[in-house]
Image (cartoon, helix red, strand yellow):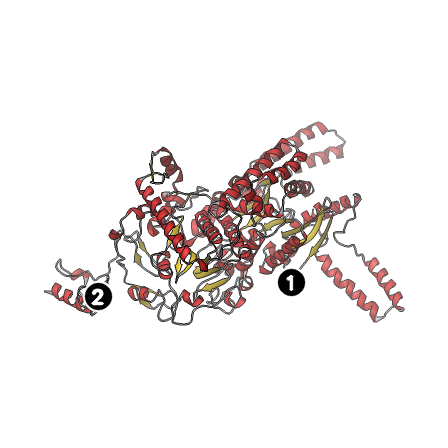
Amino acid sequence: MQGQLATRTAQRSCCGKGAPCSHPQPTAPLFRPIHPTLATSTTNTSWIARAEPDSNNFVSGPISVNTSNLAAPDPVTAASEPKATRPIDRSKGLWTRCDKCGVILYIKHLKEHHHICYSCNFHLKMSSQERIAHLIDPGTWRPLDETLSPCDPLEFADMKNYTDRIREAQAKTGLQDGVRTGTGLLHGIPVALGVMEFGFMGGSMGSVVGEKLTRLIEYATQEGLALMIICTSGGARMQEGIMSLMQMAKISAALHVHQNVAKLLYISILTSPTTGGVTASFGMLGDVIIAEPQAMIGFAGRRVIEQTLQEQLPDDFQTAESPAGPWAAGPCGTALFPQGRPFRDDWLL
Amino acid sequence: MQQSLHRRASASAASSSLPVAPIAPRISRNAGLRQRGRICKAFGEKDMPGGAIVAQGREWLNTILSRFGPMRDRAEVVTTLDFEKPLLELDKRIKEVRNVAEANGVDVTSSIAELEERARQLRRETYSRLTPVQRLQVARHPNRPTCLDIILNITDKFVELHGDRAGLDDPAIVCGIGSMEGMSFMFIGHQKGRNTKENIRRNFGMPQPNGYRKALRFMRHADKFGLPIVTFVDTPGAYAGKAAEELGQGEAIAYNLREMFGLRVPIISVVIGEGGSGGALAIGCANRNLIMENSVYYVASPESSPEVCVAILWKNRDAVHLATEALRITAPELLNFGVMDAIVPEPLGGAHADPVLAFPYIKEALMNTYKEFANMSENQIKLDRYAKFRALGQFREYVVKGGDWRRTGEERDAAQGVRTAAGTWAVSEAEAHYIEQLADADDTWERLLEEHKEWTNRPIQPPGLSRSGIMDVATSVVELRRRKQQAQLQVGAPETNGTNGTGSSTAQQPADSKVHA
């Protein structure tokens, strides 16, 4: 009886179109909720968001998304899976909090609003797949160098082996390393696009990230395409040591040929957070630098600066719009977002 | 120690017949008074306002020049590293014995000789087996020769230049034009101080954005006038401060990294102390990277930024020595990685023990390295620099799960594999299918590109460069030539090297000489 009631209200409250609707996620039914401990075997308690016990794929953070259904083990296997059997995104997490203002955000609405908090217009983190889907015209994305994989040049082991960290990050995100590169049409304009993935070891830049971005830039130079890189990173990957540092120089060298010799366009988009080696190389080299509002953009870490100066820094230090931040000093070539409207690349055309 | 260094250097310079700029003008008080008197007489009277102004001018000049002149007081604290203590004990013992022997008139030359030989042997053993932590200590030793020390002792003439043409100067970076063996070079380097007061003045060798812009401005000057650039890297890192962030520290470093690859002159970089991450790389994107034997180069300092390295990875401040060993920051390891091209030897005991002997090593290394570039054209130099950094990075082209490249490599070698329809080898059916899908995607993309060609702006390229992978060909060509050059250098035929250089450059494939990099 109660189960039937639950189903009827679920259908009615879904979208008003009548069952069956195409929305993958049903809203919560409008009957009186039953505490999980009082529930019997016949009670419909599917609406309760439970933390999975084996939630090793549960990404914690501002967007709680269970990616166990999303992530393919590696690009080769993903290619051989027929497209029809690819699972739809059924996010187990229902809500999250905004990083800046702390307001509760319902994930379904968040995704509809392009991951922008409705109260403070802060752009929450998006995965690289979501960013590509957001920007590139459907069906025109051609990925490059998906199979490039990291090694362990230093045989580094701190509390965990570097190889273990790589394996976990690869399982979590489905990528071989922390960047997706490729080409596609952006409102009909062919661009070379690189998107960094914060979920892979904090977006840290290692040899593979450097190599993929360098190949992307060389390809863009050769074909005369405009280049866009969406940067989000915690810095250089320490586990790869000096090799990570050299990637900064490598990417900058390719950018020199692309921008100064071939005189082509490079737009760099800085999302939150962008720090360390990425800020000190390709992040700040764009002909036009676009930053998301309230994004944390800096070079040295806040704690390092506080330790060096022995003084407290203001809260808005190292945010994109701060009066002393990158925007005012000039390296950010252009503006941030008007309030309330999501970013669309067609404004640049 | 530093005082005697300057004196010895100026003495040696004075003994050579070349004109020498004094390290600091010796303006003694009497000379000043005499000068003042002469000028006052020229003005007609003793206490003229003109005389007072000139005297003030002399005082002002004195205050500036005396800051970095020879040290007037001996360093009070003589730093000895803990692993050097037994060596110093032995030296002290030998000196005591010799003093006692002299006082009593006993001849102990033979036993002294044995002791000295043992001391030398011990020193040699210690310094040939330095651990990374010990090397880090040596690289940071306060008595290690700084950039100015080296420049003033290897150049015949040197003039220091200042300012970034945007309103600021940075004491942490030293730039200037000097001449070695009659050839002019542009010298740029991080400068640390010799004592605490100077260190504060020089900001411990940590440059701010204005310092990097000053360095870039002088690199552009060198590019305009064809002066080869020599950089000395000795910094704990870029300065992490509020004003530095506001002035655009990240952007200054990024700009330097990019513009250094557009310079048409050869750049040679020597790591003389510690090389700290991006702050060091901003003047270290060179055709050749040299490193002194006991210097280090790291992406994140093992100790001084615990939040970055130790606390994040080991969650323990005492794991500093673990970090130092794991990060592979010492010179031989860097040479192994290919990041550094040559190691400059140091005198026994480290450069801090005998700096005057260290300078000729550095000068010789620099001149030998420069000779490689004497016959190269501008495009070749640019391509050489690009190729050097293009080749850095360790990765695998095929899917490797969890960084386990050895096992995956063996499996791939052992597997029989399949072939795609076009004939490409793949390790499994899935990979063959993936490769075919990639080829289809490439075809689709090229069709799309044809349709939207008005949005592209293909640069003018020599014929044959339209396919991707050309950069690999160019870099491998440069690698081959560099190896051939090194082989010839080892064989030891300097004159043939020159002719072979020009000969091989004309005989190279046209793609190499015509690339407009």
**Residue A87: image location, x then y, percent:** 25, 54
Residue B78 seen by the camera: yes
Residue B199 seen by the camera: no
1 and 2 marks on the same chain: no
> Horizontally, is A133 left or right of B309 in the view?
left
**Mark 2 residue element:** loop
**Residue B49: image location, x then y, percent:** 83, 71
Badge 1 amino acid: Arg
Quadrant that contains the C terminus of chain A: bottom left
Query: Which residue is identified by label 2?
Result: A28
Between residue B480 and residue B235, name the one nearer to us. B480
Between residue B263 and residue A12, name the one nearer to us. B263
The residue shown at (21%, 66%) is A28
> Horizontally, is A76 left or right of B357 in the view?
left
**Residue A324: image location, x then y, percent:** 52, 67
Placement of A129 over or under A156, stated as above or below: below
Quadrant that contains the N terminus of chain A: bottom left
Between residue A144 and residue B111, name the one nearer to us. A144
